[in-house]
Image (cartoon, rainbow, N blue to C red):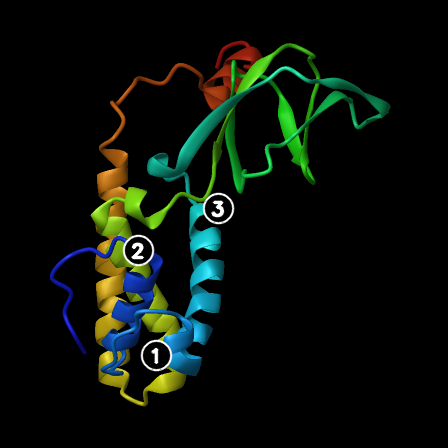
Amino acid sequence: MIELTSAPTTKIEIISAAISMVGKQQTVNTIDGGGALAIDAEKLYDTLVSAELGSNRWRFAQAFQQISIITTLNPTFDGWLYECQIPADCIMVQYLYPNIQYIVFGDKILTKSNQTFTLIYSRNVPVSKWPPPFSLYIVYHLASMLGISVTNSDRMLARISQGMEMWESRALFADAQSSVTLPFRHNPYVDVRYRYKTRGY
């Protein structure tokens, strides 16, 4: 198993590093040139990256767009009155500003207000824009997926798994440092308890 000395900056470099990490000493310059393993790795890579960027609120993958084309929902649905289209490159809605009630329904957002709002969402970004800890996390994660089918070494798989967990932790920590800490401005739990409190409690 190789040890990485620098973070990869391209998709090919990530796939090549993951293949080398599971004990296949080969240099991958193109997907087709890397053979069946590289082709399988590319398929896993595309799924892995979309799933990871779409399941966590990574700040480096954030984008925002003002939504002003809002149409009346006809018929209305469960109290929702308006709808708007989610941007094509959106893989996860993070939040709306200003804070209004909404739900994600398929490829649309349903709201109870027709006011213009800004949508903050996650989208795929080029590898060159990834923070180094996240790049290394994806390398280890991809290697762990490949390793299940190409190696019988439990020791190697355990080392890869440990590396994946370490770099995931570092990636999350680094991403969290890109925003200042703010006090709570909205606390629904406290609001509800105050609103419906019983006299004497």
Amino acid tagged 2: Thr
Image quarter of the N terminus = bottom left
According to the picture, the residue beneath numbered tag 2 turns out to be 10
According to the picture, the residue beneath numbered tag 1 turns out to be 147
Between 49 and 11, the residue placed more toward the observer is 11
Question: In the drawing, does residue 65 fall left or right of residue 68?
Answer: left
According to the picture, the residue beneath numbered tag 3 turns out to be 54
Q: Secondary structure at mark 2?
A: loop
Q: Secondary structure at mark 1?
A: helix
Is there a contact, CB below 8 Å, between mark 2 and mark 3?
A: no
How many numbered marks are there? 3
| Mark 2 neighbour class, 10 Å CA radius: few under 14, some 14 to 19, many 20 or more | some
Residue 163 in percent (x, y) is at 22, 65
Amino acid tagged 1: Gly
Is there a contact, CB below 8 Å, between mark 2 and mark 1?
A: no
Mark 3 or mark 1, which has the lower sequence index?
A: 3
Mark 2 or mark 3, which has the lower sequence index?
A: 2
